[in-house]
């Protein structure tokens, strides 16, 4: 998504993105094995690697991590018994880490190294409930996040028809609220992160046109921008850089990015950078982490910030890659 043709003002006055420092910040994360935090986050490791790898590709540093080492680690998280991936070597399979594994392999052009594609597809499909929803694993509760994981992972594997698409769409539509936003399950409070998951699922499944009132959704999403420029995830909450992705990507998919103030959001994200260590935090002055680093950079990319690779709003992966895989979908037309 580029803003070159929009009427909003140019970005001249904003501080610069410290790209090289962000690359170094991501590269440094694997050298922190003597820190408690490294081991406390083991249950999100594959997801964290997806965040880091994607950020590096968007920063134009695809060689920032050693490709073969990353792929070796990803494959070490594969579980032969069910075809899924755990978050770390030896962990049980989960749909989120399975999506992360597939995303990382796809990003490195290494999907052919997936040990058994059909078994991985079966792992995902076998989780679907009769009402169309997905749990994260065979013990977990259902949640629209996992519907997104299933739709994205299966599409990246070229096997989306293996799931019950119509039931899945029905379930996601039932997560939309009267205010236009989406919740984690039917009846749950609207949340910005779920806008990405639900709108993304519908878009991947080619059912975005079934959203009854895209203006109501766009209104709810654009209301997330606070006077400071950053976006929050729901009313009366603090702004957080990650919503520069969750909320903005949903606006991009429904063709309404112009409904937020682009310049103020760019400034807010840049203020959340740590200009000494690199990395981006949730809010200015807080500790940076790889989660907010990816979603800050991806948000900037969606906003057309110069010098970044374009990101695909539906998959949160490099846009060129999504096009080359033949799975790109255009957003809804702007009103
Ligand atoms: C491929 C990008 C990608 C995602 C895969 C797992 C998933 C799909 C999406 C996760 C979406 C999600 C639920 C993110 C959490 C966002 C977040 C920081 C929520 C915090 O919730 P609260 O209640 O924060 O602590 P607020 O901001 O509401 O106070």
Image (tube, rainbow, N blue to C red):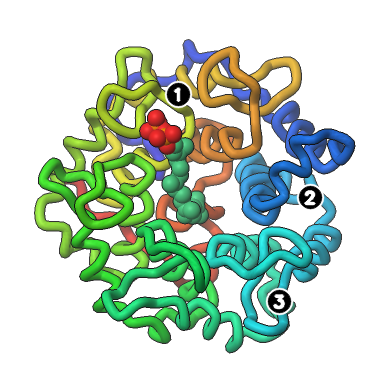
Is the residue 73 above or below the residue 253 in the image? below
Name the N-terminal-most of marks 3 and 1: 3
Q: On the rendered structure, is 33 left or right of 131? A: right
Name the N-terminal-most of marks 2 and 1: 2
Is the residue 260 above or below the residue 333 in the image? above
Q: Nearer the viewer, residue 259 or 164?
A: 164
Q: On the rendered structure, is 278 left or right of 272? A: right
Is the residue 228 above or below the residue 214 in the image? above
Q: Nearer the viewer, residue 140 or 276?
A: 140
Alpha carbon separation for disc pair 2 and 1: 26 Å
Q: Are marks 3 and 1 in contact (CB under 8 Å)?
A: no
* Residue that appears at 39% across and 65% down: 147
Alpha carbon separation for disc pair 3 and 1: 41 Å
Using the image, tell me which numbered label, if any, was put on residue 63: 2
Label 3 CB less than 8 angstroms from ligand 1: no
- The image quadrant of residue 141 is bottom left
Quadrant containing ligand 1 reads: top left
Which residue is under mark 1?
266
Query: For the residue carrying disc 1, how many other residues have a C-alpha within 10 Å: few (<14), some (14-19), or many (20+)?
Result: many
* Residue that appears at 62% across and 47% down: 51
């Amino acid at each position: 998504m580029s803003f070159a043709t929009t009427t909003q003002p140019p970005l001249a006055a904003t501080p610069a993105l410290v790209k090289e420092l962000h690359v170094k910040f991501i590269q440094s994360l694997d050298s922190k094995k003597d820190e408690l935090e490294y081991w406390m986050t083991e249950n999100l490791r594959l997801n964290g690697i997806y965040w880091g790898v994607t950020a590096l590709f968007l920063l134009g540093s695809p060689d920032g991590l050693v490709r073969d080492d990353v792929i070796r680690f990803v494959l070490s998280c594969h579980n032969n018994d069910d075809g899924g991936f755990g978050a770390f070597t030896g962990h049980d399979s989960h749909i989120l880490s399975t999506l992360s594994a597939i995303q990382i392999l796809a990003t490195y052009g290494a999907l052919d190294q997936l040990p058994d594609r059909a078994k991985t597809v079966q792992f995902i499909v076998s989780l679907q409930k009769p009402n169309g929803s997905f749990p994260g694993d065979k013990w977990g509760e259902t949640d629209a996040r996992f519907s997104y994981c299933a739709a994205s992972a299966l599409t990246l594997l070229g096997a989306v028809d293996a799931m019950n698409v119509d039931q899945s769409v029905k379930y996601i539509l039932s997560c939309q609220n009267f205010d236009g936003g989406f919740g984690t399950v039917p009846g749950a409070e609207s949340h910005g992160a779920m806008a990405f998951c639900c709108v993304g699922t519908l878009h991947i499944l080619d059912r975005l046109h079934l959203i009854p009132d895209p203006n109501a959704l766009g209104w709810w999403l654009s209301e997330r921008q606070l006077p400071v420029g950053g976006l929050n995830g729901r009313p009366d909450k603090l702004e957080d850089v990650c919503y520069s992705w969750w909320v903005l990507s949903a606006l991009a998919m429904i063709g309404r990015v112009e409904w937020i103030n682009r310049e103020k959001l760019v400034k807010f994200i840049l203020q959340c950078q740590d200009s000494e260590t690199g990395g981006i935090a949730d809010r200015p002055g807080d500790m940076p982490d790889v989660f907010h680093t990816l979603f800050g950079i991806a948000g900037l990319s969606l906003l057309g910030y110069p010098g970044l690779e374009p990101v695909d709003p539906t998959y949160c992966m490099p846009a060129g890659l999504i096009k080359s895989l033949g799975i790109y979908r255009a957003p809804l037309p702007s009103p």
